[in-house]
Every structure is written in structure tokens, then in C-alpha cells.
């Protein structure tokens, strides 16, 4: 997460649950050892769905056929010392790609993982990954507040 002034309020980010053949797409930056759901911050003045489409093109060179809203997860990044707690509103979408077999990356690694394999990954954002692993999004519970 990126630090910002608490006066600006929470950051807004979008993440995709991109599935294909009973597997979920995750990405890893070339300089990192952790995997994460594809996604990132929404730019000022950018529509949420446009942001996710842009990010998926940038991260895995993929084009979106359909987006379906799943949930909003409030993420909390607590800093040590004088730094404030930063909140991020993570909007989670179920994503269908136009051609999942064409997924590629320019500056990192993308892989398809089964549910079993995902259980062994250090998947980020942690709070979002934990929520997905322990029941996933439901239409009855589209809001997941930050856990204390």
C-alpha cells in the first residue's frame, strides 16, 4: 500500500479474481517474492472499471470481456511511530478475460493456481487474500470492514 495523508481519506484500489479452468490468476513482480491478486490503485479522475481494465493490460497484457462486482474490502495498513494508519478501500471484481490463454507479463510473473496451491502462497494483500480463502465474496455480504 502507498502512504498518503489521512486528510485525503482512504485510497481506492481495484483487484480482480481472474479465473480460468478452476484456477485463479496471481501476479508477482520481478523484484518481489510474494504473489498478489492482479490490481492496484485507481488514479484520480479514473472510473473504477476503467482502472481495473488498465491495470490488467499493464500487469498481464490481458483484455477484459466482463467484470462483475463482488465486494468492497477495507484494508488497514498500520505504520509504526508517527506515521498514521492508512486505509484502502479495495473493490473486488470477478473478471472474465477475452482470451485467458494469452495472459502474459512484461515486468513480472503471472501464474494460474488451484485453490490448493493458493493455500500455500504468501498472497497479498493479506486481508483480501484471507477473506477470499475463508468463504469468498457473496452477494449477501458485499462489504468487509477492516478487522481489528
Image (tube, rainbow, N blue to C red):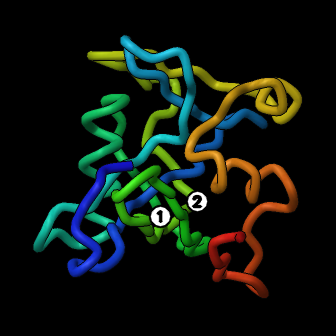
7 over 62 or under it: above or below: below
Q: Earlier in the sequence, mark 1 or mark 2?
A: 1
Q: Which residue is drawn at 45% across and 17% down?
A: 32
* Residue placed under numbered mark 1 in the picture: 67
Locate residue 142: give its quadrant: bottom right
Q: Which residue in the structure is indicated by mark 2?
A: 94
Q: Position of residue 2 (x, y in %)?
A: 31, 50
Q: Is residue 66 above or below residue 25?
A: below
Percent across and percent down for residue 38 are: 46, 41
Residue 90: mark: none
Residue 87 picture quarter: bottom left
Tag 2: Cα neighbours inside 10 Å, few (<14), some, or many (≥20)? some
In this view, which residue lies farthest toward the left? 45
Is there CB contact under 8 Å for labels 1 and 2?
Answer: yes
Q: Is residue 27 above or below residue 107?
A: below
Where disc 2 sits, the SS reads strand
Q: In which quarter of the image is the C terminus?
A: bottom right
The residue sitting at 22% across, 68% down in the picture is 5
User: As drawn, is 21 to the left or to the right of 86?
Assistant: right
The residue closer to the viewer here, 45 or 124, is 124
Callout 1 crowding tier (Cα within 10 Å): few <14, some 14–19, many ≥20: some
Q: Which type of secondary structure does the marked residue at label 1 adopt?
A: strand
Report x, y in % for residue 29.
40, 21
For the image shown, how many numbered marks are present on the structure?
2
Residue 110: give x, y in percent of width and height: 49, 21
Measured in 3D between alpha carbons, the distance from the residue under mark 1 to the one under mark 2, in whole angstroms, is: 6 Å
Which residue appears at 78% of the width and 61% of the height? Answer: 136
Quadrant housing residue 30: top left
Q: Which residue lies furthest to the bottom in this view?
A: 140
Q: Which residue is drawn at 58% across and 59% down?
A: 94
Residue 57 vs residue 1, the one in the foreground? 1
Amino acid at each position: 500500500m502507498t502512504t498518503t495523508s489521512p486528510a485525503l481519506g482512504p485510497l481506492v484500489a481495484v483487484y480482480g479474481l481472474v479465473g480460468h479452468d478452476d484456477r485463479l490468476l496471481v501476479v508477482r513482480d520481478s523484484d518481489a517474492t510474494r504473489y498478489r491478486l492482479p490490481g492496484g490503485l485507481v488514479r484520480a479522475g479514473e472510473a473504477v472499471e476503467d482502472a481495473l481494465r488498465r491495470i490488467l493490460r499493464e500487469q498481464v497484457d490481458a483484455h477484459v470481456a466482463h467484470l462483475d462486482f463482488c465486494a468492497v474490502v477495507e484494508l488497514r495498513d498500520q505504520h509504526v511511530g508517527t506515521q498514521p494508519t492508512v486505509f484502502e478501500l479495495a473493490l473486488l471484481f470477478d473478471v472474465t478475460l477475452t482470451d485467458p490463454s494469452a495472459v502474459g507479463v512484461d515486468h513480472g510473473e503471472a501464474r494460474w493456481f488451484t485453490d490448493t496451491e493458493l493455500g500455500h502462497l504468501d498472497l497479498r494483500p493479506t486481508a483480501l487474500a484471507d477473506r477470499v480463502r475463508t468463504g469468498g465474496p457473496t452477494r449477501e455480504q458485499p462489504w468487509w470492514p477492516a478487522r481489528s
